[in-house]
Amino acid sequence: MPTKKKHPIHMTDDEALKHIFHPEIVKAVKKHVKKQSEQKPRSQKSKSR
């Protein structure tokens, strides 16, 4: 007997991403996230007057 499919609320982030979105969107999102995580965080400039 096949197992019942998981509901997205019970999936990992990666599983839910693949379940909900088209594969091309998943690929683009992963590329964007990887690019953002490789960049150095911007230093926050304080505005003092």
Image: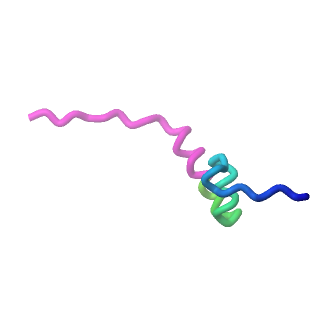
In the image as oriented, which residue stretches furthest toward the bottom? 22
Q: Is residue 44 magenta?
A: yes
Q: Is residue 12 left or right of residue 49?
A: right
In the image as oriented, which residue stretches furthest toward the left? 49
Q: Is residue 34 magenta?
A: yes
In the image as oriented, which residue stretches furthest toward the front? 1
Residue 38 position within the rendered picture, expressed as x and y whole percent measured from the top left: 55, 38
Which of the 4 quarters of the picture holds residue 18? bottom right
Residue extent of the magenta highlight:
30-49
Compare residues 47 and 21 and report the one nearer the observer: 21
Q: Is residue 16 left or right of residue 32?
A: right
Asked if 43 appears above or below 5 in the picture, the reply is above
In the image as oriented, which residue stretches furthest toward the right? 1
Residue 28 position within the rendered picture, expressed as x and y whole percent measured from the top left: 62, 58
Residue at figure coordinates x 87%, y 58% from the top left = 2
Compare residues 31 and 21 and report the one nearer the observer: 21
Q: How is the image coloured?
A: rainbow
Residue at figure coordinates x 60%, y 44% from the top left = 34
Q: What quarter of the picture does the C terminus occupy? A: top left
Q: What quarter of the picture does the N terminus occupy? A: bottom right
Residue at figure coordinates x 60%, y 55% from the top left = 29
Residue at figure coordinates x 35%, y 33% from the top left = 43
Residue 4 position within the rendered picture, expressed as x and y whole percent measured from the top left: 78, 58
The mark tally for this picture is 0
Q: Is residue 46 left or right of residue 13?
A: left
Asked if 22 appears above or below 47 in the picture, the reply is below
